[in-house]
Image: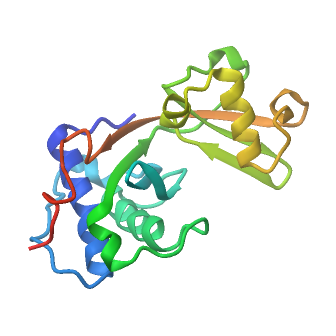
Amino acid sequence: MIELNKDQQLRLLKLARNTIADSLGIAYAGGTEFQEPIFEEKCGAFVTLHMRGMLRGCIGYIQGVKSIPETIIDMAKASAFKDPRFPPLRKEEYQNIDIEISVLSPIEPVQNVSDIKVGRDGLIISRGFNSGLLLPQVPVEQGWDLETFLGNTCYKAGLPGIAWQQKGTKIEKFSAQVFGEKEFGITPQQSKPS
């Protein structure tokens, strides 16, 4: 799994925020450099937006299709403007969002649900054309145990909550390096565009 240091994490958070600002026509302070080889890696990543502690958008690639910075640009725009659960982000909301990024490890099949660790693993449950994904931080934020996590991932896939126990249901897991503006103490006022 890719391990980004604090400086690299901060630069990706700034990239996500600047991308959203640019899309809204808001001026912002300078760009960021991504010269290190780690940024050429291709891996899945999600960008999550919260507003006043509530989810405001979350979209990602589950597998690597582009470099990390390119993925963050795509997913920042998608989370802000294309999450079908929410209306597109408005200019006046910009200062109230906080951004979180999840950089994913490769996906692996689950042979036994006892191999899943709540807080470490994210889940993908699929059956037929239905598929649902929950990031590793979700069950921790919601206070779920393993069975509740599995059931809610089934619901996300549009399946009954017990579908994970049924033959023909595929369960996969991944881990993620999760970091956000909150953990760095970045407040909306500090991220004001110049």
Residue at screen point 31% across, 41% down: 179
Quadrant the N terminus occupies: top left
Image location (x, y in percent) of residue 11: 19, 54
Nearest the viewer among 55 and 129 is 55
Q: Is residue 29 above or below residue 186?
A: below
Residue at screen point 85% across, 41% down: 160
Most extreme residue toward the front, as rendered? 52
Most extreme residue toward the top, as rendered? 114
Image location (x, y in percent) of residue 62: 55, 50
Give the image quarter of residue 3: top left
Q: Is residue 57 above or below residue 137?
A: below
Q: Is residue 99 above or below residue 192?
A: above
Nearest the viewer among 172 and 97 is 97
Give the image quarter of residue 143: top right
Most extreme residue toward the right, as rendered? 167
* Residue 110 visible in the shown view: no
Residue at screen point 31% across, 54% down: 98
* Residue 90 visible in the shown view: yes
